[in-house]
Each structure stands twice: as structure tokens, then as C-alpha cells.
Amino acid sequence: MISRIIAVVAGVVFVLSFEASAQFLPNYAQFDNGVNLGFFLQSDINHDGHADVVGIRGTEITVLLGDGKGGFGSPINSPITGMDHIVTTQIVLGDFNNDGNPDVVVLGDDHITGAPVVTVMLGNGNGTFQAPKETALVYGIPGQNGPTDVNVVSGDFNADGKLDLAYFGGPGIVILPGKGDGTFTAPITTKAAGNFLIGVGNFNSDKNLDLVGVGPRGSASVFLGKGDGTFEPAITSSVSGTFPVVVADLNGDGFSDLLVGEGRSRASALCSATGPGISPRATAILPRQMPCSRSRI
């Protein structure tokens, strides 16, 4: 798990290095409060303008409020109730009830039925979260009850102003349309083969969110969104790596591009072409400057 976190950080630093060379001070601030998080993300949970840490450990969501100086306050814990086999390799942050506060998505099994569920813990805006609101999963998520890391992303895939969830499982792409209250309606599916780590972007600038999936055998597939929760057939390119998957506009042309890690020191950059989808561009050694040119392929 540690190596995966290092890889994610390396991928993010690589993206940032396209715009500026990152520099780190030798005497950087250090903070150790003994919290061992299985997975964590950054967000301004309490709206004070400082970056906070939101993570999961065991049966709790833990928040470390940042002080803006590199330090953090004491852990604030919110219990994850009514669930068993809680996934501790991923959480998703987003505003799922449109109240302006970040909420957290947790995966696991219902404590009574044992069925796979996705839950949303609505944020209170102060570092605490409300009790989980469950939605049963018609199509299970690969790896949810096994050693494989799950991969769920959020976005407004049906253009109704409410956050949805997306993942690969069952028949292919599964969209859980959000109701705007922390729960979800019946899934919308698009047939697609494979089990992918996915990212969200707009690869053809049509205002509809698209998905990109990176498979275990060196392929990256873009699924262009139709704006109704369904997607066009895959447009596939070859890549060398599989993890992490980072979507960003790497060459400043207004199109989403893809960065795929190749271990601890290399990454493949795939920049959007003039047509829809992605095309191979270059491979670079971290942390050198991104080689994608500003001209489209």
C-alpha cells in the first residue's frame, strides 16, 4: 500500500512539473500524530482556506484539520456504522447533497444482509460526518471483498447537477445516478469489456464527462460520455503502465490528457488528438518536464 501511495504522489508531482519545477526545502515541516490511515485525500473540510487530510482507518473516517503552516490538529473521528468488510483502500470525496460541504463515500457490506453497498457520509463542515446512508449495489465492484484495490470515481455523468458514481463491474461501465441527498437511483450501464482503473475527464470538449480506463495489459480506453449516463464504444491506445492514472490538461489545449505510471520512476503521457480520444505521445523520466508539446497530435 505504501508503494502505491508513493506512486500516486510521484504522478501528481510529475503533472505539476509541466508548469513549474518543484522545489522542496530541506527543513520541511513534519507532523506525526500516530494515525495510520489506509487511504487519504486532501480537501478543505472546514472552509478555513487550509488543506485538510481526510482518511479511512478500520471503521472510522479520520480528519486532520490543517493549520496552514504544515501542521495538523488532533484527529477527528466519525464512526462508520452498519457496515462490515469496509474497504480501506479507497474513499471518494464530493458534495453529494449540494450543501457546500465535502461528503465521503465508503464501500463495504451491509451488516445485516451482507450485500455489497455504497454509503455516503454527509459532511457537517467541521470535520465530522453523519451516519452512513446506504445504497445497495446491483453490480458488485471488483475487488470490494478481495485483495484488489477498488476504483470508483465521481462526476455528474447525466448532467442533472447532482454527483454520480462510476465504476467498472457487471456488464461494464456502471453509473450510479445521485439523488442529491447522499443516495443513488438504479444503475445505468454501458457494455464494456475489461476491468479498468479509471479516471474522469473531457477528452473531446463537448461538455459531457468522459471516462478513461487503463487495463492490466497495457491498454488505455476512452469512453466518450453522451451526457445521459451512457457512453460511446471504447477508443483504445497502448500504454506501458497501469498505475496510477492521472487525468489533466498536460499541454494546455483545453482537452483532458492522460498520465499513466510505469512503476516508481516512469510515466506514459498520452495527449488528446484533434479527434476524440487519446493518442500515444511520449514517455518521460520523473521528475523531468512533461514532454507533451502544445500542438495537438
Image (tube, rainbow, N blue to C red):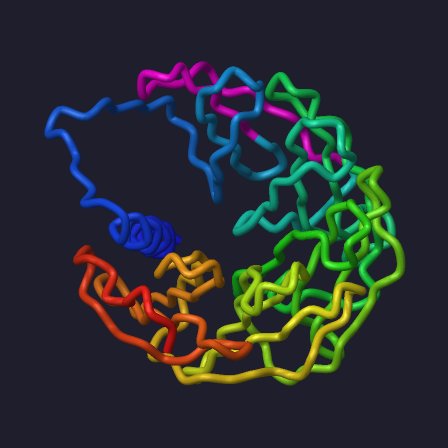
Residue 267: image x %, image y %?
29, 67
Q: Main secondary structure of the magenta part?
A: loop
Residue 278: image x %, image y %?
47, 76
Residue at figure coordinates x 57%, y 60% from the top left: 200
Q: Is residue 208 above or below residue 104?
A: below
Q: Is residue 179 magenta?
A: no
Q: Residue furthest left?
A: 26
Residue at figure coordinates x 57%, y 25% from the top left: 45
Give the quadrant of residue 251: bottom left
Q: Is residue 250 above or below residue 6?
A: below
Residue at figure coordinates x 25%, y 61% from the top left: 290
User: Which range is magenta?
Assistant: 62-81
Say how many tags the image has: 0
Given residues 23 and 202, the one toward you in this image is 202
- Residue 66 horizontal side relative to residue 127, left or right: left
Given residues 121 and 111, the one toward you in this image is 121
- Residue 277 horizontal side relative to residue 144, left or right: left
- Residue 167 horizontal side relative to residue 267, left or right: right
Q: Is residue 136 visible?
A: yes
